[in-house]
Image (spheres, grey):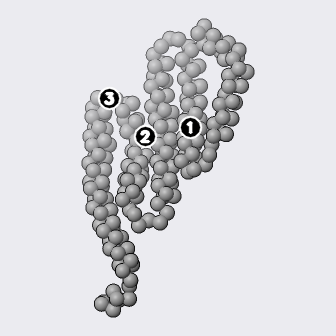
């Protein structure tokens, strides 16, 4: 063993000791985060679900069903992102950080899209059934179709920008297209919304 240590130079030994220390810190933090995640998971998805069932709150149960998979994934990705900052021995630290942030944005975009698509559309559908006006029966399907597209467009832009892709020209083009479309569709949209008001 002594011969092996003599063969290794001082920087190599220091590097190995650094890795050992970082690994022990990482494992300690992993245990703490796992316990916190387990407690949070139990409280959120078992206690809250029980409470929502007792209160007959369908929107709360639907929200918990949507959160059940993406929320732990986001929690894990945030843990990895925080712990990556503490690991000095990683060679490609910037690339890993960008990938983790991009993954957090992707999962968050999916989560927000699902929340808006299912929870908000469920609430609006319930509201549309209770009212006698017909405009909400027309407007709710339009919102259901367009809102996820807008959310995924914004999430996609943020995802690509996080990876380092310059989207300045794309943002300008997107703004220009919306400007032109707003003027081109101004009369059509005003007639459409006037018709909704008459319903």
**Are discs 1 and 2 less than 8 Å apart at CB?**
no
For label 1, the crowd category at 10 Å Cα-Cα, with few meaning under 14, some 14 to 19 and many 20 or more, is few
- Is 8 placed above or below 20 here? below
Q: Which residue is mark 2?
A: 66
What is the residue that sits farthest to the top in this orientation?
198
Q: Nearer the viewer, mark 1 or mark 2?
A: 1
- The image shows residue 161 at horizontal and vertical percentages of 57, 45
For label 3, the crowd category at 10 Å Cα-Cα, with few meaning under 14, some 14 to 19 and many 20 or more, is few
Q: Which residue is mark 1?
A: 154
Q: Nearer the viewer, mark 2 or mark 3?
A: 2
What is the residue that sits farthest to the front in this orientation?
10
**Are discs 3 and 1 less than 8 Å apart at CB?**
no
Looking at the image, which residue is at 36% across and 59% down?
86
For label 2, the crowd category at 10 Å Cα-Cα, with few meaning under 14, some 14 to 19 and many 20 or more, is some
What is the residue that sits farthest to the bottom in this orientation?
3
Looking at the image, which residue is at 58% across and 33% down?
150
- The image shows residue 88 at horizontal and vertical percentages of 39, 63
Alpha carbon distance from label 1 to label 2: 20 Å
Disc on the earlier residue, 3 or 1: 3
Q: Is the C terminus in the top left, top right, bottom left or bottom right quadrant?
A: top right
Looking at the image, which residue is at 56% across and 14% down?
134
Secondary element at image label 1 = helix
Near-viewer residue (67 or 30): 30
Residue 199 visible in this rendered orientation of the protein:
no
Alpha carbon distance from label 3 to label 1: 35 Å
Alpha carbon distance from label 2 to label 3: 17 Å
The answer to whether residue 82 is left or right of residue 135 is left
Looking at the image, which residue is at 47% across and 66% down?
91
- Is 29 placed above or below 137 here? below
Disc on the earlier residue, 1 or 2: 2
Q: Is the N terminus in the top left, top right, bottom left or bottom right quadrant?
A: bottom left
Residue 56 tag number: 3
């Amino acid at each position: 063993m002594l011969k092996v240590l003599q063969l290794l130079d001082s920087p190599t030994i220091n590097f190995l000791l650094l890795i050992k220390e970082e690994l022990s810190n990482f494992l300690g933090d992993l245990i703490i985060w796992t316990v916190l995640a387990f407690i949070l998971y139990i409280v959120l998805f078992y206690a809250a679900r029980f409470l929502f069932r007792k209160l007959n709150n369908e929107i709360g149960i639907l929200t918990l069903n949507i959160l059940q998979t993406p929320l732990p994934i986001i929690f894990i990705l945030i843990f990895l992102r925080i712990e990556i900052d503490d690991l000095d021995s990683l060679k490609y630290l910037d690339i890993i950080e960008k990938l983790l942030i991009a993954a957090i944005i992707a999962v968050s975009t999916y989560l927000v899209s699902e929340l808006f698509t299912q929870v908000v559309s469920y609430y609006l559908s319930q509201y549309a059934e209770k009212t006698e006006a017909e405009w909400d029966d027309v407007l709710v399907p339009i919102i259901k179709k367009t809102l996820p597209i807008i959310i995924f467009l914004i999430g996609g832009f943020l995802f690509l920008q996080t990876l380092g892709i310059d989207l300045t020209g794309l943002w300008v083009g997107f703004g220009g297209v919306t400007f032109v479309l707003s003027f081109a569709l101004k009369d059509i949209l005003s007639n459409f919304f006037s018709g909704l008001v008459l319903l």
